[in-house]
Amino acid sequence: MEKVTTLGEFIIERQQDYPGSTGEFSRLLSAIRLASKIVSHQINKAGLLNDILGAAESENIQGEQQQKLDIFANNQFIKALEKRKVICGIASEENEDFIPLNKEGKYIVSMDPLDGSSNIDVNVSVGTIFSIYERISPQGQPVELTDFLQEGNKQVAAGYVIYGSSTMLVYSTGNGVNGFTYDPGIGVFVLSHPNMKFPATGKIYSMNEGNFFNCSVGVQNYIKYAQTIDKATNRPFTGRYIGSLVADFHRNLIKGGIYIYPATQSAPNGKLRLLYECNPIAYIAEQAGGTASDGATRILDIKPTELHQRVPLYTGIKSMVNKAEEILKAN
Ligand code: AHG
Ligand code: MN
Ligand code: MN
Ligand code: MN
């Protein structure tokens, strides 16, 4: 049999890279792995189960109608994480306030349990996004809001799960990005995409262009730039937009491109949330040789002021994001 590396083995191997490591962090990652498997299993058969498709009767703090799978995924991740004593608190898109857990725990997790929920009912890829920090308040005391409001550059790990044509878990602990594909036959994630890097050049741009007249002249000019014919720079680019950040980002990471969710008139800070969407995606982007900004400032250097804060997002291949920033600046 061909040598395969499972996510479990990989976590143990990498643990040995950190002298003095106590295994706490590995336990946290294995909780995420477990919850991903449960959510993946449920999503794969969602079309068969009436009680899991469709909208729930509740709204979240964002004013969005929650989908049943938003709630299911949120509960699964919380359940898996609270069992591991290493976590002192969780912030989630689906919970107004952070959830305090074990006072002795060393880590906090911010998460988007189900990303792209508008795509669930139509069998299109969705995801989970997670971001991990060491707490700054002392162990032994209840977790505090300030533990969650750390800059993205303080993340100790981040990643996402994509529930697509296959389920993949992609994560980084600050030493490159690795992708694992789930084999449902044997119930394990297998290392399939070691050391993921953006290609040197790309030609995909991803934005909800329904917002064209709703955004600044700078953003409109970037879209026009992307659509202009110019052989030397391989334009026009190809427009691809799924409407699940995880899936759009994942495709652009592999094929080469830029993802944009700009500020709009109706959403002056953009739509995506800094703590559990933009920061983890920015961390992965940088670890894969790409970049992420709000159009002017590095995402990972933004000081968060609230749990559900939104920021515009431009992420992907460095040269493409830099070009977008240059065009924005000129307007
Ligand atoms: P979520 O489903 O977690 O609320 O996230 C939705 C986000 C993101 O996944 C996606 O990229 C974006 O919303 C799509 O927004 P538009 O429908 O405005 O394009
Ligand atoms: Mn939502
Ligand atoms: Mn999301
Ligand atoms: Mn979500």
Image (spheres, rainbow, N blue to C red):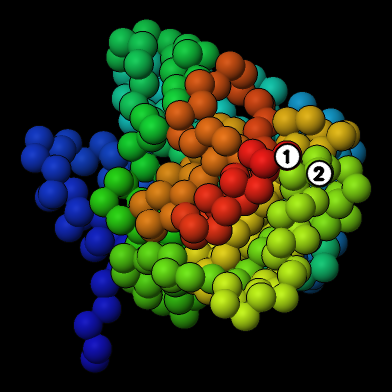
- The residue depicted at 66 percent of the width and 75 percent of the height is 230
Q: Is residue 327 above or below residue 88?
A: below
Residue 123 seen in the figure? yes
The answer, for residue 168, to whether it is visible in the render is no
Return the residue nearer the eye: 85 or 301. Answer: 301
User: Which badge, 1 or 2, is on the more N-terminal residue?
Assistant: 2
Left or right: where 124 falls relative to 245: right
Q: Nearer the viewer, mark 1 or mark 2?
A: 1
Quadrant in the rendering for residue 312: top right
Q: Is residue 142 above or below residue 196?
A: above
289 relative position to 21: left or right: right
How many marks overall? 2
Mark 1 is on which residue type?
A: Asn
Q: Quadrant of the C terminus?
A: top right
Residue 117 in picture, x, y percent from top left: 75, 52
Position of the N terminus by quadrant: bottom left
Q: Residue at x 65, y 26 (%)?
A: 309
Depth check, front residue: 216 or 87: 216
User: 10 Å neighbourhood of mark 2: few (<14), some, or many (≥20)?
Assistant: some
Tag 1 residue:
331
Residue bearing mark 2: 217
